[in-house]
Amino acid sequence: MKFGDIAVSLAIIAVVIIIIIPIPLLAVDILLSFNISLSLLILLISIYNKEPLQFSVFPSMLLLTTLFRLSLNVTTTRYILSRGNAGSVIEAFGQFVIGGNAVVGFIIFLIIIIIQFMVITKGAERVSEVAARFTLDAMPGKQMAIDADLNSGLISEMEARERRMRIQGEADFYGSMDGASKFVKGDAIAGVIITLINITAGFVLGMLGGELSFLEALQKYTLLTVGDGLVGQIPALLISTATGIVVTRAASDSDLGNDVLQQLFRQPRIMFIVSGVLLFLGLTPLPNLPYMTLSAIFLYLGFILRKSIKESIVEEDGVPQEIEAEEIKKPENVIPLLQVDPIELEFGYGIIPLADPNQGGDLFDRLVMIRRQCALELGIVVPMIRLRDNIQLESNQYVIKIKGVDVAEGSIIFDHYLAMNPGTAEGNINGIDTIEPAFGLPAKWIEEDEREKAEIFGYTVVDPSSIISTHLTEIVKNHSHELLGRQEVKTLLDNVKEHHGALVDELVPKIMSLGEVQKVLSNLLREGISIRDMVTILETLADYGTITRDGDMLTEYVRQSLSRAITKKFIEGKNAKVITLDQNLEATIMESIQQTEHGSYLNLDPNSTQTILNSLAKQVEKLMSVGEQPIILTSPIVRFYFKRLTEQLSPELVVLSYNEIDPKVEVQSIGMVSA
């Protein structure tokens, strides 16, 4: 097999050369015999294959075998017309079929050609065409099913990739078979034309140049022509049959022979009916012996099948109980119960149509987009989102869980749309008042008739699938720091290592452990900072990891390195209206920082904390009253601790340091927090 590619290439070139250059009669006999052997080999492979893709080279083989047969036809025609002799194989085939009667032999040959061309070849061609069309039409649905299984966690990324390649391979195979079946049809037509040429030209050359009588020329050239045609058409018939088997073969766990036996002889009732019909025909004037014999055979088969089915039922009844009892006793069967899915979406039975692709649901497709969106915006690979129906929920209710714990819930009204006022909508619409679950905005459930009217008035109108997917996206973003574990960080580092191997090798584990890197990345995600620029993050950790091991301080250094990205995320344009801290307050916070061996924390008395939060609330309300996003600006050393302090008031409040603002941005302080 080492030089197989070279041998195949030389064989193809030799086939073409045979058409031009004459070869010895002995070589002709060998090649004709090889042609029959090769066709038989292809037929048997087609029968024993379990699925078409196991013989994916078949379309190419059709072309090569057709070219091979045509080259042999040209060679044998040259010998028949020039010498009146085409070798012992053709002569033997002609003598065997004709049996001394040229007319009968020629008629048999024509019948074989008609069977191949009109029945097998045209049928295989039509099946190939239909199979190619249906395979291509089914591709989108199969791709969606793979994505659905991938998102639900039923298959892995590797399995999904293999299934996609398999679907693509099936489409390519049936498309190629649609075109390759034309070779078989053309080969049959060429066989008929070559036969007519051989007989006609043979008569003329035999009577004029060979000085043969009419009967002698008829006998001689009919024998040679029929022999040549049979030698060529028998392999063509085998190949045509193999083509029909391949394109009509459905995927199965066994080969064609086993499937035929299992599916024809599996119902004893049918065997008894056939036996009775044959017995009745045997009592008529028809020949008794054949029908009586066949009736007895089918009756015997019916009894044998019924006995085997009863025995298998008894075995199947006992085996599952034994297996179930043994499985329950195994201690490792408790292990799957310990598995906790990172993200789950449970919903009532009324929402099932949204998650079922067969009912037109597109929720699975939206889960794919959620993972893509989080990868682009946050730089994380969101774990598989598990979808489950829960009969304990109301029909239109859904619950989002993070690591098995409920973190959010919502409800929809099927066949309705949610209309939200972005602040610029004018006019009233009829609907059911509600609250948008993702952002808590006032909204209305409206019917299909009101949708166009609402959009004209300026309302934002979304369908139920968009509501659930948007809510799920926000939950994933808000809890992304919880979803990023050490294993996920290892995956991200392996991805960076492909192009920045030296950076990763220097940092982990020489300077920082995997857990320490994970803590810094979680701190960034907690405040909505994307970790997509992993190279910059790791470069900063490599620079400052030798100075301090405090994860919170390292997070601040990384934030300063990501200043442009942070500015772009939280500040629009070149101007920023912010709230600053009083110098005395910053000094108080710095004096209240307590250092321990496990890290640092802010130690403020409750009264001072409440005073700071009250002052902050007033300034935030003032800034929001003028339509600005509240942004708190502090010194770098204070930022982290003040952020932790403000989480008691509002976890979404943005706290930045001076070093995190792009120098090109003009900062305007319109409020100050004091103690």
Image (cartoon, helix red, strand yellow):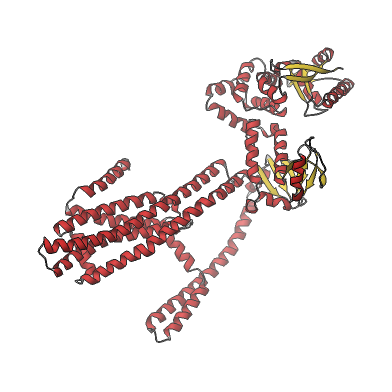
Residue sitting nearer the eye, 410 or 494? 410
Q: Is residue 6 left or right of residue 486?
A: left
**Residue 432 location in percent, x, y?**
82, 47
**Residue 388 location in percent, x, y?**
69, 48
Quarter where residue 598 is shown: top right
Q: Is residue 366 left or right of residue 204?
A: right
Q: Is residue 87 above or below residue 662?
A: below
Residue 413 in view (yes/no): no
Quarter where residue 458 is shown: top right
Residue sitting nearer the eye, 560 or 108? 108
Which residue occupies 52% across, 28% down? 498
Which residue occupies 24% across, 72% down? 104
* Quadrant including the C terminus: top right
**Residue 580 location in percent, x, y?**
80, 17
Q: Is residue 608 left or right of residue 596?
A: right
* Quadrant including the N terminus: top left
Q: Is residue 229 above or below residue 165?
A: below
Q: Is residue 368 above or below residue 27?
A: above
